[in-house]
Structure formats: structure tokens, C-alpha cells
Image (spheres, helix red, strand yellow):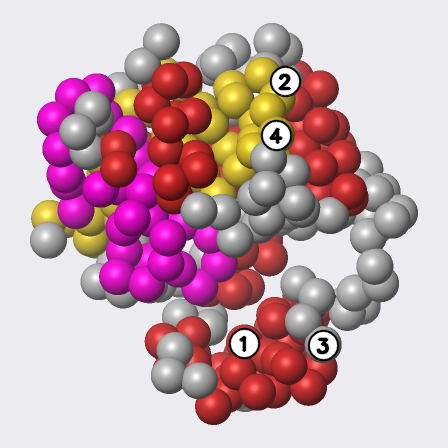
Amino acid sequence: MSTAVSRDGTRIGYTRAGQGPAVVLVDGALCYRNFGPMGELSALLAPRFTVYSYDRRGRGESGDTAPYAVEREIEDIAALIAEAGGSAYVYGTSSGAALALQAASMLPDIAKLAAFEAPYITDATRPPTIENYPEQLEAALAENQRGDAVILFMRYVGAPAEQAEQMRQTPMFPAFEAVAPTLLYDARCVENPTDGESLPPALVAQLGGLKTPALILGGGASPEWMLNTQRSIASAIPGAQFRVLEGQTHELAGSAVAPVLIEYFGE
């Protein structure tokens, strides 16, 4: 493992693999280098790129420094880009896509951006979800009820209550509990406006001024509301490309997205 030091002194653990132009991979909720989809994707990209996989702050072998702010996570990405020589492509998925979108508006050293299914709610067809989710999540974590926080997240993203509760019995649940406090970080990366039917105005303003080339991706088997969100994001970015990966859901296969990223970043 290598370590980058963020602006606030937080140490960020990362792994570098491959050769070629630098690509930084930004994970979604509950995932980090040793737990999630980026390991497979890194291996698929490494023959063409130098891939930087890292643990977002508060996860895996990265540190954490209070108080949290989305800007601190953007500074973490900046520290990784500095480790890569001062310029990099960035790919983010789910809440990591939301973080990557915001980072691209602040970091001119991101040469190209690709983002898969940033989970903003911009469509009334989204099934009803948990009201006051961030507040309930914060309350559970304040009581150190990490398992309850994980279950709350599972229900928020659409798992039926009984199915979510069954997760407690699975082998991966302790890994989820270990990083449960970062679920609040993800919630802050993907803050929705109160109407739940549009992108946050501040994000729209950021994206409207984005000069970084951007590729916005959605899964062809994902719900229509999720695809509509990606279309809204792409429409907000001048010159952005939008592409649907047929047959894919939010649980995106590395083998499905790797060829797309190789083509896009290799142009």
C-alpha cells in the first residue's frame, strides 16, 4: 500500500497498478479497495493505464479527520492526482460518481471524467423511500448503532425491510458495519433538493461551468428514474456524452464498463 497525504493531513491509502495515463477510481457507498467492484475494474484497465484505487476517507486503510465536508474528499482526490504526476482521468460510480462530478468542477487537473449512475433523485417515478434519511442515519450513528445504520441505508436504496434485516446474517455484514459512519458522508455527497424532482441547483451551476470532458453512463436495466437522472446530469454539462450500458444495473459489471472507459480515456 502507498499513502497520499490530503490537505488536512489525512492519510489516504491507495494502490497503483499498471502503466500508462493515470486513472483514479472513486468508489460508492460501503466500498473500498478490498471490498467492492473496483479491484476487478482496476485489473481490466491496468494493461492500458496506471490505475489508482484508493480507500475513501474513513474506510479501509485511510484515515479520517473531523469535521467532515465534501470538500475534504475532493482534496483527497487532488492528493491522489498529485501522486499521479499532476493530471489524471477520474471514474466514479454511484455516490463516488456524485463526488467525482463535484471534484471535476473544482480540480482542473482532472483531464477527463466518467461517471456511472450518480444517485440523485430527479424523477417522480422513483418509488417512495425513507423520509428524513440523513437525519435518521445521523441519529443511528450518534448512538453507535452501526448495524442499524447499514440496514437503514439498504432500505433507503430500495431493499424490502425483511430482506434488509437478513443482511445482518451475511458474512459481509461486519465489513459494512466497519465503514457505516461513511454512509453519512455519501448522503452529503448526494444531497437532493427538497422537491426530489430536480438536480440540486448548486450542482447544476457547477456542472454548467464544467470544462472537463465528461462521459455520463447509465445501466440499460436500471430503473427509468435512474436513467432520467443521468440524462439530466449529461444535459447540465456542456458537451457531455451520455451512454447507456445495455443489460446493466446499478450493480455494474467491471467487464461491461472497462471497454467503454478504455475507449473513452484512450481517445
Which label is found at residue 150? 1
Residue under numbered circle 4? 244
Q: Earlier in the sequence, mark 4 or mark 2?
A: 2
**Residue interval drawn in magenta:** 15-43
- Measure how far apart labels 1 and 3 are at the Cα level: 13 Å
Residue under numbered circle 3? 160
In the image, farthest residue toward the front: 247
Measuring 79% from the left and 65% from the top, which residue is drawn there?
129
Mark 4 or mark 2, whichever is nearer to me: 4
- Measure how far apart labels 4 and 2 are at the Cα level: 17 Å
Which quadrant is home to the C terminus? top left
Left or right for 196, reference 51: right
Measuring 61% from the left and 71% from the top, which residue is drawn there?
154
Question: Residue 39, how many percent across, how many down?
Answer: 27, 50
Front-most of 250 and 30?
A: 250
Depicted 173 relative to depicted 231: above or below = below
Question: Residue 79, how many percent across, how many down?
Answer: 25, 36
Q: Secondary structure at mark 4?
A: strand
Residue under numbered circle 2? 237
